[in-house]
Every structure is written in structure tokens, then in C-alpha cells.
Image (spheres, rainbow, N blue to C red):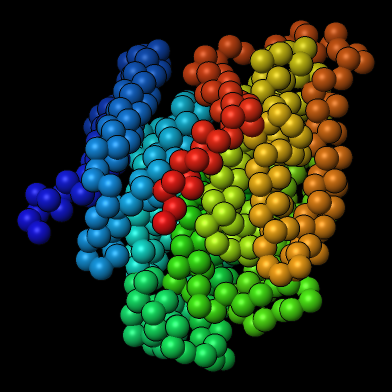
Amino acid sequence: MSYLELLKLASPEAIVTLTALVVLAIGVASGRGTVVAGVSPAKPQESAAGTAASTVVCTLVAVAGLIVAITAIVMLPPNADLFRGMLVISPLNSLFKIVCLVLALLTILLASRETSNYGEYLAIILLAAIGLLLLVGSEELLMIFIGLELTGLSLYLMTAFDKADIRSAEAGLKYFLFGSTASAFTLFGLSLIYGITGTTSFSAIADKLNTQMLSPLLFAGIAMTLVGFAFKIAAAPFHLWAPDAYQGAPVSSAAFIASGSKVASFVVLGKIMLVGFSPIHGSADWHAMVVGWSPVLAMLAAFSILLGNLVALVQTNLRRLLAYSAVAHAGYTLLGLIAGGREGFGATLFYTTIYAFTLLGAFGVVALVRRETGGDDLQNFAGLSARSPLLAGCMAVFMLSLAGLPPLAGFFGKFYLFSVAFAAGASHGLLWLVVVALFGSLISLYYYLIVLKLIFQTQNAEKFTASPIAHSVLPRMTIALAAAIVLCLGIAPQFLVSRILAALP
């Protein structure tokens, strides 16, 4: 294969890389332009105008680069395999590369003027997007680990990027410490798997495991690998970084961590479990439990659902509430992987996608409210409907979708997951896990409705009308777009479900 052909097949990653470098150069150049040889600019107005112009240019370049990368993905051949799985082009990988890039694009639109050093911040988002592309587009353990580290390092920086807020630095440090420990577990687990199977390709690992029993060493390797991915998806008890990261990070950083990172992690986890480790699936059926990775995931799912929902009940900060809610939703999403098969994986992919758009929109509302009120506690959202009916309506869509009420996408996503899990196994063996998930959904309805009660409260509403939310066109359009996606995928879920199932082998 020539270098030209290789560059063509890797063109989406190359385009995003080039875009990140251009945005970084613009950001650094504009930042140095304010001070030349120790001389401050003559007028503060000129400095502010230059910063605003740089922000607009960086945003336009980043958005254009992501759109071109999405176009390049569409133009890729249907199937290709480079270097024994290091870069795999398939309908499934291409579909979720597009999803990850769309989430990165929406994050950039939400981040407009949120942070200082805006060009550098956008460059880090784009570098994180490259890591997501490598994660989704690879079926080889070493390349996946490289993608995990590139994404992780970028997200650590994004979390600690707000130098004016000490909570951001604290959150970034906690995220880094937990993440580096989880990465060490993952790498050690992958090394054990390689030592046992002699390969790092998913399909080759599955072929080797077909002829082997589940040894203690192999089980240890799988368990350590799961520790790393449980950290990425914030499944309990590996979720301790999430509340501080969601609350302390810049809001757009938290949005991207909760959306793009989760989507790519579930895609990779599903391929590793259902393709690479499929011969040792085991069984989590209550009446016929068999040793394998399935019972381990079932315990993680049940614990995540219960702990996430119960702790979310007592939260007074909306971002921490969404963090513990994310722990519970990670448990729901694992149900599809535990059920296994094409339908189970499809249900997981559908749910993680609609959840990503829902949480991205919810964090967009949080960003605008925080910008106007200076906080993101629940009381800061009181009377939001009087200050901004559009934001209140969009937030209602997001909260009700997370609660799983029709006709929103969250309802169909949960119904799809629960029905697949209920039908899996012999004699409805996963019924116990479905009951736990239904109980968790019932609990979550309470705290989501508490948020909506505050937003739409009419008592003493006159004191809120004096401080309307400022008119921010681009973030508002992004939030409205996310709400429209959640509503449309609830009314017509087959639009996405059919594409996911068609892309699955």
C-alpha cells in the first residue's frame, strides 16, 4: 500500500490533526499579539476587539475542519483493514466517527467565549476528537490504548483549563490521578491477555480463546481491562472522579467528557467484549450463572444504577446531580452488552448516542445559566421559565428524556435496552437486572422532576423576570438543535436504530 492510499484511508484523522495545529497556531499568535516586547496595547478596546476576532476565526476554522472531516468519512470505502486491525474502516466505525465529530462540533459551538486562551482550548478539544477517532476506528488493543491515552490526556487538560477557578485545578488533578491509575490497570490487563493469546487483534484473540479454558490469569487480565473502561464510562465503584470533574471543569469540557468520551468508550468496550472476548461471555442469569465477563458487568451495572440514583437524590448542585445520574445511566447502558448479540449491542449503541446528545444539551443550558447567575446550584435555575422560555423548554426535554418518559428518545432507548435484556438468556434469566433498572428509573424520576419544578415555578416569579438570560445566539441554537434531535429520535427512533443495525456485522 502506497503512502497516498494510506493517507486517503486515514484522511479524517489527518484533517482533524491539521485543523488542531492551525487553530493552535492562530490562538498562540493572537495571544502573543497583545503584548509585544513588553509593551501593552495602546487601547484596551483594541485588545478586546483582537481577542473577539481571534475567537471567531478559531471557531470558524475548527468547525470547517470538522465538517470537512465528516465529509471525508462519508467518502471512505465501505470496508478496509490497515495493519491487521490498527485502522479498520467499516460501516459501524464510520457511523460512530461521524457521531463523535458531531459531538465535538456542538461542544465547540457551546464553548464560544467561555474560556481564556480560546484557541488553545479548541485545539485540545480537537486533539481529544482525534483520540476518539482512533478508539472507534481500531480493532487492535495497542492502538486502542494509544487512543485512550490521547483522549485521556486531552480531557485532563480540558478539566483543569479554567485557571481562575481553583475547583477546576482540583478536578483536573483528581481526574488525572484516577485516570492514570485506571490506565495502569488497563495496560497490565492487556499485557496479560497478549501473553496468553499471543496477539492483540480482536478476531485473533477470539480464535485463540475458542480453544482455551477460562484460566485465573486470563480472568485477571479481563478484570483489569474492565477496570480501565469502567473508569471511562464512570461505572460504580470507579466513578469517584466524575462528580468533581463534572462540577469543577469548564461546562463545555464536562459536556464533552459526558458525551463524546462515553460514546467512544461504549463502542470500544462492546467490540472488545462481544468480539474479542466472546468465547468467554459467561452468563449473568439468576438461575444459571456461568463464570465469565458477563456476571462482572452485571454486578457493575446493578451497583451503578442503585448508587448513582440514590446519591443523586441528595444533590443540590445540578452538575453533581448530572454526574451521579451519569453513573446510573452507565449501568443502564451496560444491559445491552450483558444481553449480548447483535440486538444487545445495537441497543447499547443507540442509548449511548441519544444520551450523549441529551447531556450535551443539558450542559449547554447549565453554561448559559451559570454565565448569568454565577452558579449552577439548583436554586440558580429557579424561575428559569420566566427568564428564558426557550432554555426552560429545552431543559424540560432533556430532563424528561433522561427520566425515560415518552415521546422522547430516552423512553425508547430504555425500552429497547430493557426489552433486549428481558428476552436474553433462557427463561428470562436477566429479569433481576431489568427489575433493578426499572427501580432505578423510578427513583430518578423524582430528582428530575425536582429540577423541572424549580425551573417552572410560578410563585414569586416576578423577581426573576427582572434578570432575563442574555441573548446568546450560537449557544441557544446549539441547545435547541440538541433538543430537536432528542425529540425526533423519540418520535422516529428507527432513523438511527436501522442504521446501527445495518452497520453491525
- Residue at image location 80% in from the left, 32% down from the top: 451
The quarter of the displayed image where residue 53 is located: top left
Left or right relative to 296: residue 25 = left
Number of marks present in the image shown: 0
Residue sticking out furthest to the right: 459
Q: Quadrant of the C terminus?
A: bottom left
Q: Quadrant of the N terminus?
A: bottom left
Which residue occupies the foreground of this view, 498 or 471?
498
Task: Please tell me whether residue 285 is drawn above or below residue 315 in the rendered image.
Answer: below
**Residue 330 location, x and y as percent?**
65, 54
Is residue 46 in sight in this rendering? yes
**Residue 186 location, x and y as percent?**
49, 73
Task: Please tell me whether residue 474 is drawn above or below residue 215 in the rendered image.
Answer: above
Which residue occupies the foreground of this view, 268 or 106?
268
Residue sticking out furthest to the front: 427
Left or right relative to 496: residue 70 = left
Is residue 32 in sight in this rendering? no
- Residue at image location 85% in from the left, 47% down from the top: 443
- Residue at image location 52% in from the left, 14% down from the top: 473
**Residue 458 location, x and y as percent?**
88, 15
**Residue 324 location, x and y as percent?**
72, 50
- Residue at image location 43% in from the left, 60% down from the top: 148
Which residue occupies the foreground of this view, 167 or 446?
446
Task: Please tell me whether residue 145 is drawn above or below residue 170 in the rendered image.
Answer: below
Left or right relative to 477: residue 199 = left
